[in-house]
Amino acid sequence: MSFFQEKLAVIGSIAKAERRKLARYGAIGVSSLVLTTALYHIVSVRIFPHASRTLLYTLVVIFVSWLNYEANSYFTFEKKRSVATIARFTTIAIIATILNTILLWIGYELLHLWDLLVIVLNCGIVTLFTFSSHRLFTFHENPWRHLARLK
């Protein structure tokens, strides 16, 4: 096997492993979307119909984010929980929650779109952000290596 064939084989195996992680992350993401939508509907329509939809959505997102951490740390990235990982996940979750809340507020309050449509659109946008962040930062063996390159 030539040098280039060896390198292509290595790259192919890495790409296959990444596709597997992305598929698992996607499966958890779809489950989270269903759960978020169901919980949001129950809370905003059945339990607290007159409360702020933005506040209720934020609370649901926080709860589902915790479930995502548990599922992704075990199933997608296969990492053991540690204080450092939890802290990094919390940082990304806070940023994603803020992004989610702002996007819901813009879509629902300003643009007057159907709230469940905005939630589905948010899921796509925030999923791209969170997967790359968790892959490169939260569950990475050396999460600060990217910052070292900037110096």
Image: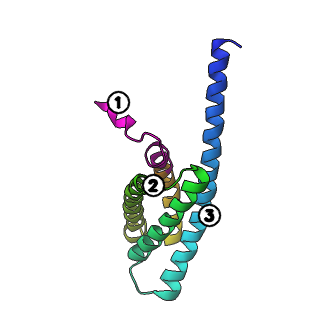
Q: Where's the C terminus, which quadrant?
A: top left
Residue located beneath label 1 in the image? 149
Q: Amino acid at mark 1?
A: Arg
Q: Which residue corresponds to the image point at 43% horizontal and 57% vertical from the top-left? A: 86
The overriding secondary structure of the stretch rendered in magenta is helix
Residue shown at 48%/64% (left/top)? 65
* Residue at the limit of the structure toward the left, as seen here: 151
Residue on which the image places disc 2: 82
Query: Circle 3 sits on which residue?
Result: 31
Front in this rendered view, residue 28 or 144: 144
Circle 3: residue type: Ser
Question: Above or below — where is 96 with respect to 114?
Answer: above
Q: Amino acid at mark 2?
A: Ser
Q: How many numbered callouts?
A: 3
In the image, taking residue 151 as reference, residue 45 lies left or right, namely: right
Q: Earlier in the sequence, mark 3 or mark 2?
A: 3
- Name the foreground residue: 107 vs 73: 73
Q: Nearer the viewer, residue 79 or 35?
A: 79
Q: Residue at x 44, y 53 (%)?
A: 85
Image point (48%, 60%), residue name: 122
> Where does residue 8 sit, x and y in percent of width and height?
64, 22
Which of the two discs, 3 and 1, labels the residue nearer the N terminus?
3
Can residue 11 be seen here? yes
Instruction: Give the answer, above or below, for where 88 lies relative to 59.
Output: above
- Splitting the image into 4 quarters, where does residue 57 fall? bottom left
Q: Is residue 132 magenta?
A: yes
- Give how far across and how far down residue 49 sits, in percent: 46, 86
Picture disc at residue 103: none
**Label 2 near label 3: C-beta < 8 Å?**
no
Which label sits in the foreground, 3 or 2?
A: 2
In the image, the segment drawn in magenta is: 131-151
